[in-house]
Image (cartoon, rainbow, N blue to C red):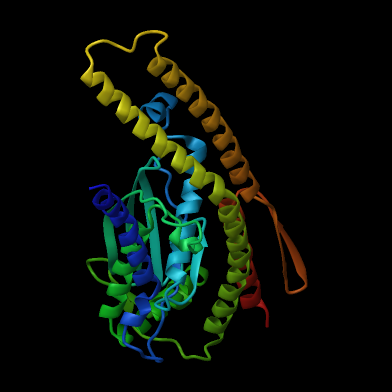
Amino acid sequence: MNIAKNIVSLLPCVCTLLLYCLGSNLALAQPSNDERPLLDVSIEIFAMNLPQDALTQQAEDVYPAVRQAEARYLPSFLKLILEESVTWGAVRLLPEPDSGAELQISASIVSSNGTQLELALIARDATGRIWAEKTYTGTAVESVSLNQPLLGTDPFLYLYQSIAYDLAEMASSLSNAQLNEIKSVALLQYAALLAPAVFTPYLSSDENNMISLARLPADNDPFLLRVKQIREHEYVFIDVVDEQYESFFVTIKPVYDLWRRYRREQIASEIDKINREMRQSNDLRRGSYMSLLESYNNFRWARMQDQYLDEISEGFTNEVLPTDITLEDSLYHLSGTLEEQYQEWKSILKELYELDEQSP
């Protein structure tokens, strides 16, 4: 009987490992075609969905420092999952929506307590086509071995693999012509923000706000060549941001894993306490062993919580660093949050485009 119970208890872990292996080799199930266009994916930092007042945060068991970290940690892990597949081109993590995204992913953290994770996600391509619009929910599954690869150690791996599978399935359903149109529309949408009068006529939209190509500019169009150059300059900053997010992810992961494990233990203990109280009519006798053990656990969890919150807050603070970028013999110093730096950099690039447009 004990052997049977042990086998049953390992089933969720075994399923998770199988899903991980399936997800890592997802591209193997796709037809091989060297000519097939690969869409770039832009992932926006997740919305925190943070209650405004402290009482509501406490009632909903939400910790602002943890939620701020999760808003960057969770999309970072999704980025790693998508990069494991050859289904996509470049996968970028950005502090805000990408104005020239080929495939944009946005999500809101509905709930996250270490035991359950719930994400309301929407993925939309440049033409306005919805790829996924659903709430993904996962229950934590502990890792089987400490020797697993990085992507196999997350207790919510199945949730991320579900997202990756849905997106890959949608990509495989589109023709090469449709994928190429998405790429062209994305570039022209980006161009239209820099030079509306020049590039807006190349696009058309219907009553459902679906965008399509009205016509294409010539490959050697000087305006388009300048836009592509500006876009490459934007990628320079995005690469710097990506390094900061990656450093943040690596720094936070160990303590965040501990935080999640601690929260699972705490929730399990609270459930045990409720069940115990339901089985007995009276409260725990003051001074009894169970009463003392409960007091000790409450004290231990309070100390651990303070420690983890301090470390997570410190990691989040360190993530926001000034950025120095050298471009065309000029040095640009960007400061503030990554969102503010990104806005400042886009303003600089727009000015560079306008100056280049005015030059003979």
Say above or below: 178 vs 143: below
Residue situated in front as seen by the camera: 272 or 309: 272
Say above or below: 271 vs 13: above
Q: Is residue 109 at all visible to an observer of this figure?
A: yes
| Left/right of residue 308 with respect to residue 17 in the rendered view | right
Residue 342 place in picture, x, y as percent: 58, 58
Q: Quadrant of residue 134?
A: bottom left
Q: Quadrant of residue 354?
A: bottom right
Residue that extends furthest to the top in the rendered view of this protein: 286
Label count reads: 0
Residue visible at 36% across and 30% down in the picture: 269
Residue visible at 46% across and 37% down in the picture: 262
| Left/right of residue 143 with respect to residue 65 in the rendered view | left
Residue 173 place in picture, x, y as percent: 25, 79
Residue 218 place in picture, x, y as percent: 47, 91
Residue visible at 41% across and 36% down in the picture: 265
Residue 254 place in picture, x, y as percent: 55, 49
Say above or below: 356 vs 72: below
Say above or below: 296 vs 48: above
Q: Is residue 128 at all visible to an observer of this figure?
A: no
Q: Quadrant of residue 41?
A: bottom left
Figure quadrant of the C terminus: bottom right
Residue situated in front as seen by the camera: 331 or 217: 331
Residue situated in front as seen by the camera: 321 or 33: 33
Residue situated in front as seen by the camera: 220 or 138: 138
Residue visible at 36% across and 63% down in the picture: 17
